Amino acid sequence: MKLFTDKATPVQLQWLVWGIIFVINFLSYIPVDGFQEAAFYTFFNTLFYAIIIYGNINFLHPRYYQTKQIPLYIFLSIAFLIGIGAIRGYLVQFLSNKLFSNPAMPPNPISLQTIIYVILASTVVFILSFVFRIALAYFALKRQAERMLEQKSVAELNLLKSQVQPHFLFNTLNNIYYEAFRESPRTALLIGRLSEIMRYFVDESPKEKVALGTEIQFLENYIALEKIRIRHGVTVIFEKDLDSDYKIPPMLLMTFVENIFKHGIDRSGSDNKIVLSLKEQNGYLLFQTENPLPARQPNPAKEGSGIKNLQKRLNLLYGDDFELTVIRSEQFFCAYLKIPLI
């Protein structure tokens, strides 16, 4: 049964504990009082034990003790014990006289001594409620840790599954690359670039930082694939003057290049030209793009959303230690980014 395994929930464990308490009480009463009286006393004692314990751990302790109202907590706890003890002593004695007293003999009186004894016994149960609370917290924490381990295992398994498909695709693309190289080396080259882009998305983009050389290669692959969609071609000048071993957050420069091919290319024109400049200066990375604007721009309403998203990301990454400038005229669009190289 699940109840007797290490997977049992705190609620199931509580039922188990109360079941054990009930059985122990019942077995201690039955030799003296018989079955019916033993069942009666066991039921009421267990019921009042539960009221005392849960009254403390679910109401008094969280509402007053944990909110630093210690004097009020002590006062209400004493009042609670006196009240519950008096009710328990009176009710149990009253019902016992009604149900089990000998008609030929007078009923047992409800004495002050009995009430005091019950209150003292209730105090012991109240103290044990702290142990009960600690045990519940332990099992709840243990269960939470088990669930986190299960979720971690499931996440790792899903990650392994997600990696199988891309690597299968990479291998397939490599096979297609070698087949295509025999007939069309240019097509094979484009397939190779596509494979590198996909590998970047899978292996590099989840990282916090990637080598600048890897980011540059990704941009060049992207540009090469975009160029085949332009009927009359496009001239791309990419100036680089820096150490490619620097590391930057992935996909940080991509927004500018993607924005150019979305909004800055005249697909029917023959004079498209893009100038990209990437260099290091005084511990900062400077990236600048410049391109002419076509007479008819596709989706003009959507233009600029990528830049806005980049602005938010830069704020999170660098605070105020960056520069992002966009200059737009009727003929040209220029973008400038300056970020620290750490």
Image: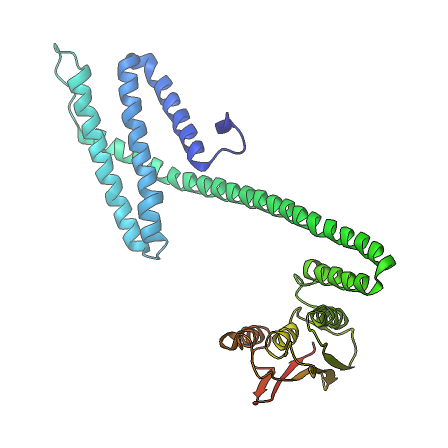
Direction from residue 136 to residue 190 in the image, left or right: right
Q: Residue at x 49, y 42 (%)?
A: 138
> Compared to 134, does 291 lie above or below?
below
Task: List x then y, in percent, for residue 155.
Answer: 60, 47
Q: Residue at x 62, y 44 (%)?
A: 153
Q: Quadrant of residue 234?
A: bottom right
Image quadrant in which the C terminus is located: bottom right
Single out the residue that lies furthest toward the right: 182
Q: Quadrant of residue 177?
A: bottom right
Task: List x then y, in percent, for residue 333.
Answer: 61, 85
- Judging depth in this view, the residue of 196 and 319 nearest the camera is 196
- Judging depth in this view, the residue of 332 and 164 nearest the camera is 332
Task: List x then y, in percent, for residue 269.
Answer: 66, 80
Q: Residue at x 30, y 17 (%)?
A: 38
Direction from residue 173 to residue 311 in the image, left or right: left
> Which color mode does the image show?
rainbow
Say if residue 285 shows up in the picture: no
> Compared to 157, does 49 lie above or below?
above
Task: List x then y, in percent, for residue 147.
Answer: 54, 43
